[in-house]
Amino acid sequence: MATILARLGQNCTTQPAAGSPAGKRMASFSEQLKNESEPIWQRIFDRPFLKEIKEGTLPEETFRFYLLQDYLYLGGWTYCGG
């Protein structure tokens, strides 16, 4: 019996046939979300503010203003959250 099963298994494969729909792996839910949101992420990271921070060319005054606004925003959240 073992010999028969071994011979049968010689021609078996776990790989789908070439060109079959089973050959394409479905994207996971998180991969689908990432792929669909890629244009949005690109627009976010293409903002001049972020590019200038990355390149080290953001004027100091602009950065100070950002920090002040961030401080005020987070302070408001602290007040709301207790």
Image: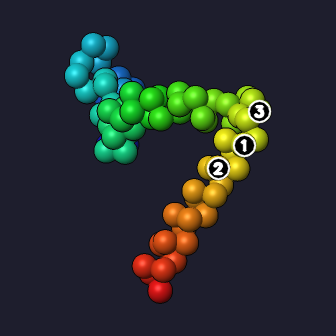
Residue depth check, mark 3 versus mark 1: number of the one nearer the observer: 1
Judge by depth and name the residue closer to the eye, 6 or 55. Answer: 55
**Way the structure is coloured:** rainbow
Q: Residues within 10 Å of mark 1 (few under 14, many from 20)?
A: few
Q: In the rendered view, tell whether residue 40 sits above or below residue 78.
A: above
Of residue 24 and residue 65, the one placed in the foreground of this image is 65
Give residue 39's quadrant in the image.
Answer: top left
User: Could you say which quadrant of the image residue 72 lies in?
Assistant: bottom right
Alpha carbons under labels 1 and 2: distance apart: 6 Å
Give percent across and percent down for residue 59: 73, 35
Image check: 42 left or right of 14?
right
Say whether disc 2 or disc 3 marks the residue closer to the N-terminus: 3
Q: Residues within 10 Å of mark 2 (few under 14, many from 20)?
A: few
| Neighbourhood count class around disc 3 (C-alpha, 10 Å): few under 14, some 14–19, many 20 upward | few
| Above or below, 36 relative to 68 | above
Is label 3 in a helix, a strand or a loop? loop
In the rendered image, which residue does mark 1 sit on? 61
Q: Disc 3 residue type?
A: Gly
Residue 56 marker: 3
The span from disc 2 to disc 3 (Cα, nearest Å) is 16 Å
Q: Earlier in the sequence, mark 3 or mark 1?
A: 3
Q: Which mark is residue 65?
A: 2
Q: CA distance from mark 3 to mark 1?
A: 13 Å
Would residue 80 be found to the left or right of residue 71 on screen? left
Q: Are marks 2 and 3 in contact (CB under 8 Å)?
A: no
Q: Which dot, 2 or 3, sits closer to the camera?
A: 2
Three-letter code for the amino acid on which mark 2 is drawn: Phe
Instruction: Say whether marks 1 and 2 touch (CB < 8 Å).
Output: yes
